[in-house]
Image: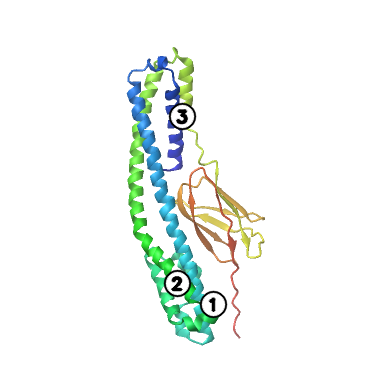
Amino acid sequence: MNAKQLDELSMQKVVEKLWTNTTPSILALFPEIETIKGQYKTNIDLLDNFYNGQNTNRTGTALSKEEIRTVMSQQAYTIAAKTCAYAIAIDDEELQMKVTYTYSSFVELRQAVVANTCQEIFDIARDLVTELTPYGVSEASLNELRESIRQFRAIQPKTREGIVDKKLFTSQIADLFEENRKLLFRMDQLVEMVRFEQPLFYEQFNSSRKIIETGNRKLSLRGNITDELGQPIKDVKITVETKKPVSATSTDKGNYQFKGIPGGVWAVTYSKLGYKDQKEFLAFTPNQRVDFSPVLQQEVQKQAVS
């Protein structure tokens, strides 16, 4: 459910509450109002249920998958870097080429490929675990990577099922909104009958029909960007990769913020010349703020060999 739909649902709930609190003597002025009210309330309850189901699929399963992917990628990258250091020490160019990666390459790999890449790194390091022990690669660290790969592969089918469920919820939500709009139109016509007979109720009803747009005014994301020494970094470009990506730049104190980010799980990238790009997957819920403060690592400048 998007921000506009949530705002519309809030309006519908206000109207439903007004009818619930209206005295029987006024209700008696409106033909068939009990039938209309009953269907209207049923639809609102269903919308709440469908929203909870849709939100669970969007910010539950998807977020878990991305969290597992991040951990798995970090583990594989670290083991690859240590194996690469070993390869350089023994002057094994073939091994060095097999385990040379940038972290951004893990972020950019497709879902179907990233687990296979991590598995290849695991297989190489497992065969060299004795030689890699001085570099910090242990059986325990390899087992952790293997478990992350297993978890990531296990959750893939669940995520695809979640996408199907999300589409079904979205379609049903749209149908319920359309039905309630028709019921509201009938209510509008009924209330016009008592415009002068019941002016107070008429005014209350029309006030309750106003949709208050809240999604674009509240902070969706804020944070403070620092380096590894805890110093703020200014002029970092932050991009939230929604369907229509939005960007901002950090202040002199490293602060940044966004408003009106639609609900869902979106990639957020942080980039600045001289620092390693960082990508995080964050879950957004309309009208709720996410606080995230990344620590950026400086790029290692390679020295020219004379």
Please tell me which of labels 1 and 3 falls first in the chain: 3
Which residue carries the number 1 mark? 136
Q: Which residue is mark 2?
A: 143
- Tell me the residue at 44%/16% (across/down): 195
Foreground tag (1 vs 2): 2
For image coordinates 33% across by 54% down, the residue present is 161
Q: Earlier in the sequence, mark 1 or mark 2?
A: 1
Residue 63, located in which quarter of the rendered image? bottom left
The type of residue carrying mark 2 is: Asn
From this viewpoint, is residue 110 visible? Answer: no
Q: Alpha-carbon neighbours of circle 3 within 10 Å: few (<14), some, or many (≥20)?
A: some
Q: Which mark is residue 115?
A: none
Is residue 145 placed above or below 63 in the rendered structure? below
Residue closer to the observer: 233 or 90: 90
| Residue 173 visible within the image | yes
Q: CA distance from mark 1 to mark 3?
A: 61 Å
Q: Residue 109, percent across and down?
A: 42, 66
